Amino acid sequence: MQLYEVNFKSLVSPKSGELVVPFREVVVRKLERAPGAFTMVREITCRRLRDYVAASLGRGAFFARLGAVDRAKKTLSVDALITFVFTLLEMNDSEFFMNASGDEIIIDQSFLKLATNSQIRLNQFEEFDHFLLQREEEDAVPRSVRRYFGQLETPIFFRVW
């Protein structure tokens, strides 16, 4: 059985009379049971950057526009993004996306069976039973995302939707 820990750093602020900004940061950790304790295997942090959320794995920077899951608008919900991060934690090869030759990668149930050790079943989610990763040129990446990953040496940006 896989063990995970998910921590939300929340921030709620009023905007036009509504409560918005449900989170500032989400940290997802994959844990391994050791005698008498747990050890962390891998950790990925998702950070809210204005209307976007972003995470990185190696040189890969993954970002998505927040909103209800809508393929036409290329938006994803927080739940969908956390599920995507679980997929990143389970990758057999953490450099897979950086070495992929195509500009688009579809992550569906068959991908999970081949490229991960995951027991995640995407087909249980009607609204996000697959993810599309689209490689983006740096000029097409939102400024807030580029600025956040400025410390990465030659980052490769992927839009997730």
Image: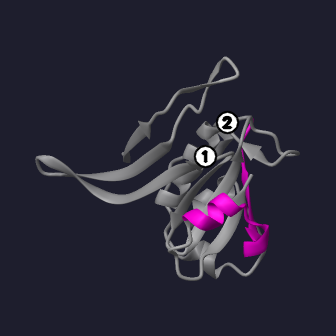
Above or below, 53 against 21 in this view is below
Q: Is residue 58 left or right of residue 33?
A: right
> Pointer 2: residues within 10 angstroms few (<14), some, or many (20+)?
few
Q: Residue at x 53, y 64 (%)?
A: 56
Identify the element where label 1 is drawn. helix
The residue labelled by disc 1 is 81
Question: Which mark is drawn over residue 60?
Answer: none
Question: x and y percent of residue 112 in the render?
Answer: 60, 58
Amino acid at circle 1: Leu
Q: Is residue 38 left or right of residue 23?
A: left
The answer to if 20 sits in the magenta stretch is no
Question: x and y percent of residue 90 in the render?
Answer: 48, 59
Q: Is residue 93 visible?
A: no
Above or below, 78 against 117 in this view is above
Q: Nearer the viewer, residue 119 or 152?
A: 152
The answer to if 143 sits in the magenta stretch is yes
Question: x and y percent of residue 87 in the render?
Answer: 55, 55
Q: Residue at x 38, y 47 (%)?
A: 2
Question: x and y percent of residue 122 in the render?
Answer: 64, 44
Q: Nearer the viewer, residue 139 or 71?
A: 139
The residue labelled by disc 2 is 125
Q: CA distance from mark 1 to mark 2?
A: 12 Å
Q: Nearer the viewer, residue 56 or 84?
A: 56
Q: Residue placed farthest to the top in the image?
A: 17
Q: Nearer the viewer, residue 17 or 153?
A: 17
Above or below, 80 against 90 in this view is above
> Pointer 1: residues within 10 angstroms few (<14), some, or many (20+)?
many
Q: Is residue 99 left or right of residue 68?
A: left
Q: Is residue 47 visible?
A: yes
* Range of residues picked out in magenta: 127-148
Q: Residue at x 11, y 46 (%)?
A: 36
